[in-house]
Image (spheres, helix red, strand yellow):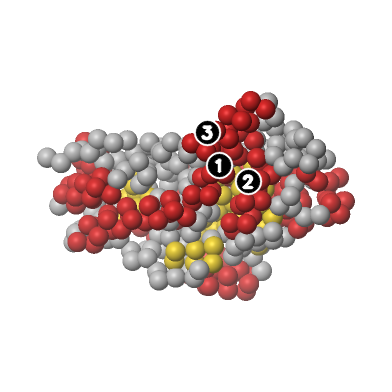
């Protein structure tokens, strides 16, 4: 019987250039982002400039985590306690958590058959709720039809925050994810596309939003030491009105990230080559459904999702168990018990007036998820795909 033995949580090591840069930072003793010599740009400053350039946006802020970036994005956008924020029902827990942290109330929007946000439900809930903010997770790397998303945002005057935790490097119609909305947030947590253990980016083209985000992130009055940032005059009033919610990036992590950012596009190709091997095997199975990726989507498949239509709860649990016994770790987003990195929307019990979302529950009830770490070779992916297809039968 085929058996897989590698770890699904083992990422690649940090590139040697990153390790050397990190050692230099440690030797210097100047780990704090504002601890610079005259005319020196810190590793954090350089990382922000490089990420702004990568995204093609004027402003980028590096901070302590993706969830933190989402939180201060909302604060910087002017979200007030009790405001409604539209967001995906199918997402990971940091998203509703960040909304809660800003005092706002999530308005959960259904998932669609293609695993993206359901745009009909979005349109309806935008109209009914009167929400002025929309936090869109490009969940598990699936980009919704961004042309239609933007049309809906325009029609209802929605301030769009893109959660790009799974789409760093991805595009829609050739345009980078994170450049559609008003603000975009990214994560550099170990299982995302670049890895510093923890870390986040916030990008925007709005100078007032960036000035507030920089103040929130814990800049003290050192905002002039930001380079991917608006000029000092934008901070004139903002610096008095914006609380410091300390969540800075440090030079050690920035040093580790810079060489990874330089490699990102090549890494994305490696993920996609692995994804296509699995996709081909799944497409041959009559039991497995894997939605075709839209022509316009330039995806980065650091994970794979598929459905087993018609499978009962017991059958899904049996597939997860049998794959697990053969070394293939699948996650089930439909589980009514939150486990590992998955939790279904109805387990976020702090949300008041929790809606019933039968469509989302139905789709999640047969949706399985698997990480594709780059420590897996293409042959490994072939073997994993064969094991899954065998177990599913
Ligand atoms: C990881 C993740 C985040 C937040 O990132 P952290 O850096 O872990 O705070 C936000 N949204 C999604 C969908 C994520 O997977």
Q: Is mark 1 within 8 Å of ligand 1?
A: no
Image vertical order of residue 183 relative to residue 70, above or below: below
* Other-residue count near label 2 (Cα within 10 Å), few / some / many at <14 / 14–19 / ≥20: many
Q: Is residue 192 visible?
A: yes
Q: State if disc 3 and disc 1 touch (CB < 8 Å).
A: no
User: Which x, y percent locates residue 261?
Assistant: 53, 48
Distance CA(mark 1)–CA(mark 2): 7 Å
Q: Earlier in the sequence, mark 1 or mark 2?
A: 2
Distance CA(mark 2)–CA(mark 3): 15 Å
Identify the residue at image location x=29%, y=45%.
377
* Other-residue count near label 1 (Cα within 10 Å), few / some / many at <14 / 14–19 / ≥20: many
Residue 281's image quarter? bottom left
Mark drawn on residue 19 = 3
User: Which x, y percent locates residue 136?
Assistant: 54, 58
Q: State if disc 2 and disc 1 touch (CB < 8 Å).
A: yes
Image vertical order of residue 360 relative to residue 68, above or below: below
- Taking 76 as reference, is 367 left or right? left
Identify the residue at image location x=24%, y=35%.
5
Q: State if disc 3 and disc 2 touch (CB < 8 Å).
A: no
Q: Earlier in the sequence, mark 1 or mark 3?
A: 3
Disc 1, SS: helix
| Residue highlighted by disc 1 | 257
User: Which x, y percent locates residue 157?
Assistant: 66, 69
* Other-residue count near label 3 (Cα within 10 Å), few / some / many at <14 / 14–19 / ≥20: some
Mark drawn on residue 47 = 2
Image vertical order of residue 217 relative to residue 357, above or below: above
Q: Nearer the viewer, residue 96 or 197?
A: 197
């Amino acid at each position: 019987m085929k058996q897989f033995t590698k770890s699904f949580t083992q990422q690649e090591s940090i590139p040697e250039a990153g390790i050397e840069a990190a050692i230099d930072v440690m030797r210097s003793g100047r780990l704090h982002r504002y601890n610079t010599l005259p005319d020196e740009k810190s590793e954090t400053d350089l990382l922000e400039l490089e990420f702004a350039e990568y995204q093609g946006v004027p402003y980028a802020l590096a901070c302590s985590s993706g969830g933190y970036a989402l939180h201060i994005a909302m604060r910087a956008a002017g979200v007030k306690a009790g405001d409604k924020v539209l967001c995906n029902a199918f997402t990971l827990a940091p998203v509703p958590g960040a909304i809660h942290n800003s005092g706002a109330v999530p308005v959960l929007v259904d998932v669609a058959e293609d695993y993206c946000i359901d745009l009909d439900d979005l349109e309806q809930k935008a109209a009914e709720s009167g929400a002025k903010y929309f936090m869109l997770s490009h969940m598990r790397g699936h980009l919704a039809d961004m042309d239609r998303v933007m049309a809906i945002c325009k029609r209802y005057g929605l301030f769009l925050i893109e959660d790009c935790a799974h789409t760093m490097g991805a595009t829609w119609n050739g345009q980078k994810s994170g450049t559609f909305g008003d603000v975009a947030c990214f994560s550099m947590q170990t299982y995302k596309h670049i890895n510093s253990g923890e870390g986040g980016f916030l990008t925007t083209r709005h100078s007032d939003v960036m000035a507030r985000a920089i103040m929130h992130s814990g800049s003290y009055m050192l905002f002039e030491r930001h380079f991917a940032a608006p000029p000092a005059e934008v901070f004139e009033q903002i610096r008095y009105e914006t609380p410091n919610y300390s969540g800075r990036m440090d030079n050690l992590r920035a040093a580790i990230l810079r060489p990874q950012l330089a490699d990102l596009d090549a890494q994305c190709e490696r993920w996609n080559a692995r994804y296509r091997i699995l996709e081909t095997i799944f497409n041959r199975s009559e039991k497995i459904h894997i939605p075709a990726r839209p022509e316009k989507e330039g995806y980065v498949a650091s994970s794979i999702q598929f459905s087993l239509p018609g499978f009962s709860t017991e059958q899904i649990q049996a597939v997860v168990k049998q794959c697990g016994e053969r070394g293939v770790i699948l996650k089930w987003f439909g589980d009514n018990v939150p486990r590992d990195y998955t939790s279904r929307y109805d387990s976020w019990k702090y949300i008041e007036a929790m809606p019933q979302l039968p469509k989302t529950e139905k789709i999640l009830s047969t949706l399985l998820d698997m990480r594709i770490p780059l420590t897996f070779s293409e042959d490994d992916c072939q073997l994993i795909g064969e094991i899954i297809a065998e177990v599913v039968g």
